[in-house]
Amino acid sequence: MLAVDRENRMLFVGDDWAEDHHDVEVQDSDGRAMRTARLPEGVDGMGRFHELIAAFLPEQADPGQVLVCIETDRGPWVRALIAAGYQVFGVNPKQAARHRELVSLSGAKSDKADAHTLADMVRTRRHQLRPVAADSDIAEAIKVVARAHQTLIWERTRHMLRLRAALRDYFPAALVAYQPLGLTGADTLELLAKAPTPAAAAKLTVTQITAALKTRRRDIPAKAVAIREALRADHLGQAEAVTTAYAATVRAVVAILQTLNTQIKALQDEVEAHFGQHPAAETYLSQPGIGTIFGARVLAEFGDAPGRYADAKSRKNYAGTSPITRQSGKSKTVHARFVHNDRLVDALHMQASVAILNSPGARAHYEQLRTRQIGYNAALRQVGNRLVGILHGCLKTGTLYDEATAWSHRTKPLAA
């Protein structure tokens, strides 16, 4: 989306992107459409985009005078826009949809109209939009591998639940036998692949089971005997034909889970290697409740562009840990933020749950919150909110976490 301010020569550009093309509109400061175009994705399209901008921007002008609004904050196209020096605003599609309702009551929608909406949005509401900050290459790389690693873990959980549902329907003895080991464990998957039916599992010997438990460190003989007894116990089952069909599906899910386990481990190594190269890695690792994986996830989602967060409150708002207040007349309520970065919220929640076990300050803060009848999740969210503020201070000053300094303000009980 592009607009021209006659005094400052600012350009406002609306970019409605698709997989293979971009619809753009150039507006002036009064909202008048000066030029519309459909550009192809890729190098040729970016070249034509620059030509379009050059037709309105004076020579030797600062490219920062060009404001581009687009419904994404990542990808080669966005990176190229940032590299060219343009100010890029990546907006949530829901934000754009709400603004579309303001500029068009008919409900009509098209790519060209969406470009117009984005142009109007950045022209009139840019003070409310968040510019896409340019993270370092290593931060972008960490984001790629950290997100891929977490996505595979989520996929493994989904397939584990499918496996559990199938076993419950035709082979409940396997749930009893393998549940202590975990359904995604290498030993469990090996035994299920070898014997996916009740009849086959009942024939497994202690020696065969023991061989599958080779990665276990303690009580292998006792575990093997317990598994064999559970597999041979009486359970309700299905007809032979149905059992055979279920066994085929279980073999497929087991093969997927085995592959996922291998690739999750490979990506974990990549996450650790990339995270270790970042200059702020030591600062992240000094925080309570953060290890390499959580540290990489938090860094990836926060990014490392200088000046992205004006203060700790801005970082907390983006993290989704700070509450929002709704007030109307005499009614005033405080709520959690439901619009947030799910990956970041998940990592911060896990950090807080670990921090209250290892940090005396975090634990004391948590217990004070609980004595005020604040629920478990809400208390963890408030602990996480405080930890985000501490992290912001450490990153800003370039210092490592210090327990005494971080929680010095909590030496007195919270006000009732």
Image: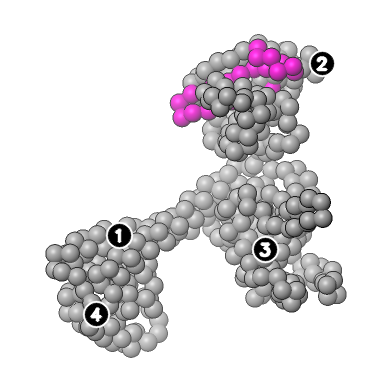
Q: Nearer the viewer, mark 3 or mark 1?
A: 3
Alpha carbons under labels 3 and 1: distance apart? 35 Å
The residue wearing badge 4 is 235
Quarter of image, res 178: bottom left
The residue wearing badge 1 is 253
Which element carries disc 2, helix, strand or loop? loop
Query: Start and end of the magenta stretch?
Result: 12-34
The residue wearing badge 3 is 381
Contact, CB < 8 Å: mark 4 with mark 1?
Answer: no
Residue 19 at x, y = what percent?
A: 46, 30
Contact, CB < 8 Å: mark 2 with mark 1?
Answer: no
> Which quarter of the rendered picture does the N terminus lie within?
top right
Alpha carbons under labels 2 and 4: distance apart? 81 Å
Alpha carbons under labels 3 and 4: distance apart? 44 Å
Contact, CB < 8 Å: mark 2 with mark 4?
Answer: no
Q: Amino acid at mark 2?
A: Glu
**Which badge, 3 or 2, is on the more N-terminal residue?**
2
Which element carries disc 1, helix, strand or loop? helix
Q: Nearer the viewer, mark 3 or mark 4?
A: 4
Alpha carbons under labels 3 and 2: distance apart? 47 Å
The residue shown at (72%, 25%) is 123
The residue wearing badge 2 is 7
Mark 3 surroundings: few (<14), some (14-19) or many (≥20) residues within 10 A: many
